[in-house]
Image (spheres, grey):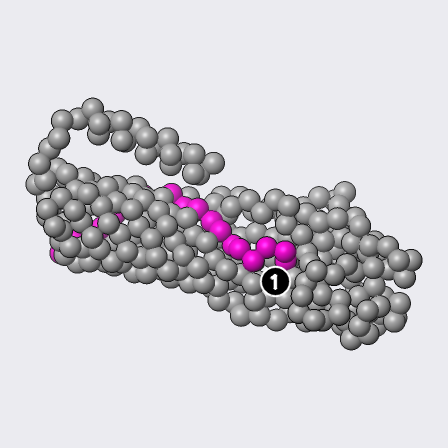
Amino acid sequence: MIKMRFAIIACASLSALAATPAVAQTSDWSGLYVGGSIGQADVDSNDGETLVFDTNRDRVFNDTVNTTAPANAFSPGFCSGAANGNAPAAGCSSPGSEIGYALRMGYDWQYGNFVFGVLGEISKADIGDAASGFSTTPASYTFQRDLDYTLAARLRGGYAFDNFLVYATGGYAQAELDRTFSTTNGANSFTPSGDDTAEGYQVGAGVEYRLTPQWTVGLEYLQTSLDDDDYQVAVGPGTAPPTNPFLLVDPTGTDMRRSSDKFEYDTINVTTAWRF
C-alpha cells in the first residue's frame, strides 16, 4: 500500500513537471547539510512464512518433527503473526504501520544540473513482525522481531532544476533487532541464540524543494532489506520424556528458526534539511 501511494504521488509530480516549461537551474546544491525526516513505516508482508526444523542437528533446516505414530507434530500449521493461543483457531496478531523518524547528515556536489552526494542516517520506527507454529500437543511457538534502530550510509544522485532536486538513493544499512521467542510448551527447554545485528541495503527516491538558500523540504520513499539469518532456538529435553517429538531423532533435542531470512520494510517520509 505504501508503495502504491508513493507511485501515485510520483506520477502526479512527474506529470506536473512535464507540463511545465524547462527552467534553468538557479540553486546551488553543493555543500554540507543536516536534517531529519518523519513519516510512515510499514513492514512488508511475511504471509506464508513458517518455522523450519533441524532434528538431526546437521545445520540443515529441512526436517519434519514427527510424533511416534509417526505423524507431523506441526500438522495444525503456521501463521504469519504472534499466536494468540495454543491452536490456530485462536488466531494470530500482526503489527501495522507506525510512525518513523530519522536524523541525517550529508554532502552534495553539483556539476551543471546534476547533483551527486553521500549521506549518513540513523532512523527509528516501532515496527516488527512475527511467525508462529502450532504443535499437536497442543502448544504454540512464536518468533518475534522488533526494529530498534537502523544506521545507513547511502549515495544519491539527481537532477536539479529551478529550486527542485529529484534524486535516487541507495546504499548500506545495518539494524539492531530485538528478537524474542515465546511458547506455551512447558515441558521442553528452549535456548535462543544469535546476534541482534542485521545487515542489508536501502534503495529509494525523492524530491527536495528549496524554500530559502539554506532551508529545504522534501518527500522521500525508502525500501530497507535486511538479512536476518542468525537467530535460532535450541529445543532441549527439559522435563519431556524420550518419546517427545523434538527428541526422537536426537535425544539432545532439535533446532528451529523462521523460514524467511529477510526483514524488509518501507518508509515514506517528509524530509527537511539545513544547508550550510
Farthest residue, direction bottom = 252
Indicate left or right for 48 with 204 as reference: right
Residue 176 spot, x, y in % from top left: 47, 64
Return the residue nearer the eye: 31 or 70. 70
Residue 209 spot, x, y in % from top left: 20, 40
Q: Residue at x 13, y 51 (%)?
A: 110
Q: Residue at x 31, y 57 (%)?
A: 154
Return the residue nearer the eye: 96 or 162. 162
Farthest residue, direction right = 69
Indicate left or right for 247 with 101 as reference: right
Q: Residue at x 38, y 47 (%)?
A: 222
Residue 202 spot, x, y in % from top left: 39, 53
Return the residue nearer the eye: 241 or 275. 241
Return the residue nearer the eye: 206 or 94. 206
Residue 91 spot, x, y in % from top left: 71, 44
Res 22 seen here: yes
Q: Secondary structure at mark 1?
A: strand
Q: Residues within 10 Å of mark 1 (few under 14, many from 20)?
A: few
Dot 1 amino acid type: Thr
Q: Is residue 146 magenta?
A: no
Res 215 seen here: no
> Mark 1 highlights which residue?
180
- The answer to which quarter of the image holds residue 232 is bottom right
- The answer to which quarter of the image holds residue 269 is top left
Farthest residue, direction top = 19
Indicate left or right for 86 with 230 as reference: right
Q: Is residue 87 above or below residue 60?
A: above
Circle count: 1
* Magenta-highlighted residues: 258-276
